[in-house]
Structure formats: C-alpha cells, structure tokens
Image: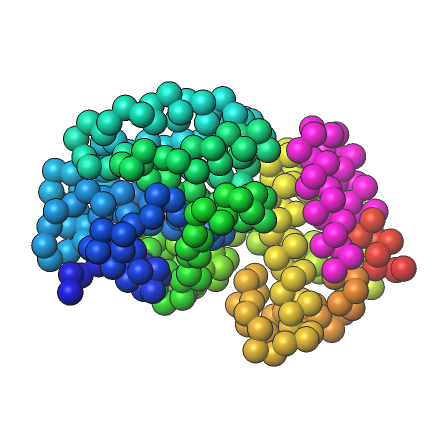
C-alpha cells in the first residue's frame, strides 16, 4: 500500500479514505472539508489536489514531482482558489459565475481541474443555488473542495451531493512537534521560555493553524491573557470599583477589545467547565487549580451570562460603535451580573 499524505498531521482515517478513493479511481466530484478555523482544511485540500495529479508509485502525493511542486506552491493552472473578498461579509453569486465561465474549459496540464472554495459557509442563498446547479452535472474532470467551518449554513441539497470530511482535533503533543518542525518562532520560544510555547499550544485548542499564528504573535497573545486575568481578578473581587480601574486601562481600539472579549469568553468557558467536569478540557487555564481559583468566586450562571454579554458586544463592535463607550458599558454590565 502507498504511504499516504505525509504532510498532513493526524487525520489518519480521512487520509486513508481519500488515498483509497484516489487509487481506486472513485474520488467523488465534490467534498466538503469541515473543521474549525486553522484546523488544516486548506492544507488537506491542497494535498488532495496534489494527490489527484501525482503519479508517484510509493507516496501519495510525493511532494517532489512537477505536478506536486506546482500545486503545493500554488502555481498550478488547474487548481483554483475561490474566496470572498476579505472586506465582504458574504460570498456572492458573482464568484460562482466566475467558476462557471471556466468550468467547461478542459484542464491545462492535469487530468482534473480542482476548485478549492474557501469559507463556503459564507455563500449566500443565491450563490448556493447557483453552485448547486454546477454540482448537479459537473464536467467529469472537475473536483470541488468546499472548505467550511460551519456546515449548518449550507443547503441540505449541497450536503447531499458533497460528502463531508471532518478534520480532527490535533493532540497538544502533535501540535508542539509540528510547531517545532515548522516555526522558527516556536523554536525560539521553546529555547527561551518553554512555558510560553505550552501556553500557545493550549490556546490553539487542537488547531495547528491557530497555534502557528499564536506563536508568531505570542507577545500580543500573552498580553491579552494577562488583560483577561486582570479583568477576572477585578470582576470576582469583593471590591467592584476595581472594575472601573480596569475599564480605564482597557485599550481603545476595536481589534484589541474584540480579541480581549474572545479570550475572555474562553476563560469564562473554562471556569464553567471546571465547575462541572473535572476531566474537562481547558483552553485558557493551564490547570484546574488556576480555573478553580475563579470558579470559587463566581457561579456558572454568572459566567455564562457574561459570555453572552461579551458575544453581544462583539457583534456590535462589527458596526463601528464608540469603543470607549462599549468598554464602559461592558464593565457596567459585568458589575450588574456580579451583584445581581
Ligand atoms: Zn508527486
């Protein structure tokens, strides 16, 4: 049996299934590759495209032949990445029209033409309906790979024609090994302060992509974490005026406040987990003792209420509200939850 997908971390059953389908010539016209952001969906899709083109007899894909090199480096004329503009909320029908224009032109160099559709869950209804038409009767050389963080947003009619492959949650040990192999910043952290690297691995929650970006921005991430700890100390202290002091120190830009709220919801989730499941998986605190320190001072209901408030504020921040006012309102709401 050929060695399959050496560049993909874990995901063994997914890799075996695909390798078999490719070897047997029964790879379907479409797959949905679903998983959390940063969980390797894009890497899997690119490796599938390479595997469909590679003719090596021992490893699938070999990573070295001309086809593999072009695809893995993003230069193949037969592999297309379709994504919505970063500043747009939705993936519109225009992008599907672009695909349609090239759909009936035979591949240039390969036997297949692969369309990798990123953030497929952001396709609006018109786009999904137009895509469905292509999916119903695609030319035999076409393969669609839809990358998707949330399959709930996709029409059932799309899901019934494109099987779903779920990416695996990568274990902390494998994430660490991958980081040390591929990220010079991770190596630097490991040599100078290994505990910081462990914190990044913990915060990545099974996602290699997230772990890599956290390492690149480790200073920023560590700062956010201490901001959250500071907030939790103020919020759970008996002297709630500490919350006002905290509020004055909260930076005024939307991105930082947004990141602060996201990190805070993870910490609050850990506090709730530590109260109900001693074997639960923590994402912010490195151990249960740390989480329990706060869990003793706040009820689960209060923690969950604050998560709701933080998520509501994150939605509002998208619409460019006054950030200072938002921070003050949030601290006020947090105080009400605590004393209520
Ligand atoms: Zn190859």
The answer to whether 119 is drawn above or below residue 270 in the figure is above
At a point 36% along the width and 67% down the height, the residue shown is 173
From the viewer's side, name the closer residue of 279 and 245.
Answer: 279
Taking 4 as reference, is 212 left or right? right
At a point 41% along the width and 55% down the height, the residue shown is 165
At a point 74% along the width and 44% down the height, the residue shown is 312
The answer to whether 211 is drawn above or below residue 319 in the figure is below
At a point 78% along the width and 45% down the height, the residue shown is 330
Residue 335 location in percent, x, y?
83, 53
Q: Main secondary structure of the magenta part?
A: helix
The answer to whether 191 is drawn above or below residue 319 in the figure is below
Residue 113 location in percent, x, y?
27, 34
Residue 248 location in percent, x, y?
74, 41
Q: Is residue 53 visible?
A: yes
From the viewer's side, name the closer residue of 318 and 124.
Answer: 124
Indicate the quadrant containing the C terminus: top left, top right, bottom left or bottom right: bottom right
Q: Which residues are magenta?
A: 304-332
């Amino acid at each position: 049996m050929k060695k399959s997908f050496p560049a993909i971390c874990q995901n063994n059953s997914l890799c075996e299934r695909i390798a078999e389908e490719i070897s047997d010539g029964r790879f379907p016209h479409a797959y949905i590759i679903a998983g959390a952001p940063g969980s390797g969906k894009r890497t899997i899709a690119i490796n599938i495209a390479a595997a469909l083109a590679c003719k090596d007899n021992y490893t699938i894909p070999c990573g070295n032949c001309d086809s593999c090199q072009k695809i893995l480096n993003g230069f193949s004329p037969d592999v297309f990445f379709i994504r919505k503009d970063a500043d747009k909320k939705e993936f519109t029908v225009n992008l599907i029209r672009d695909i349609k224009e090239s759909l009936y032109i035979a591949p240039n160099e390969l036997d297949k033409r692969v369309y990798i559709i990123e953030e497929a869950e952001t396709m609006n209804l018109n786009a999904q309906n137009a895509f469905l038409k292509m999916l119903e009767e695609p030319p035999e050389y076409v393969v669609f790979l839809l990358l998707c963080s949330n399959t709930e947003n996709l029409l059932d009619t799309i899901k019934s024609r494109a099987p779903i492959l779920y990416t695996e949650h990568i274990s902390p040990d494998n994430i660490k090994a991958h980081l040390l192999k591929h990220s010079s910043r991770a190596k630097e952290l490991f040599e100078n302060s290994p505990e910081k690297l462990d914190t990044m691995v913990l915060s990545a929650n099974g996602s290699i992509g997230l772990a890599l970006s956290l390492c690149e921005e480790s200073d920023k991430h560590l700062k956010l974490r201490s901001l959250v700890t500071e907030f939790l100390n103020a919020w759970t202290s008996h002297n709630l005026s500490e919350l006002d002091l905290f509020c004055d120190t909260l930076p005024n830009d939307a991105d930082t406040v947004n990141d602060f709220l996201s990190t805070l919801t993870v910490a609050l989730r850990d506090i709730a987990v530590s109260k109900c499941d001693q074997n639960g998986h923590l994402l912010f605190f490195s151990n249960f003792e740390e989480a329990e320190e706060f869990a003793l001072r706040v009820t689960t209901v209060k923690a969950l209420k604050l998560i709701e408030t933080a998520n509501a504020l994150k939605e509002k921040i998208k619409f460019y509200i006054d950030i200072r006012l938002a921070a003050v309102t949030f601290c006020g709401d947090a105080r009400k939850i605590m004393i209520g």
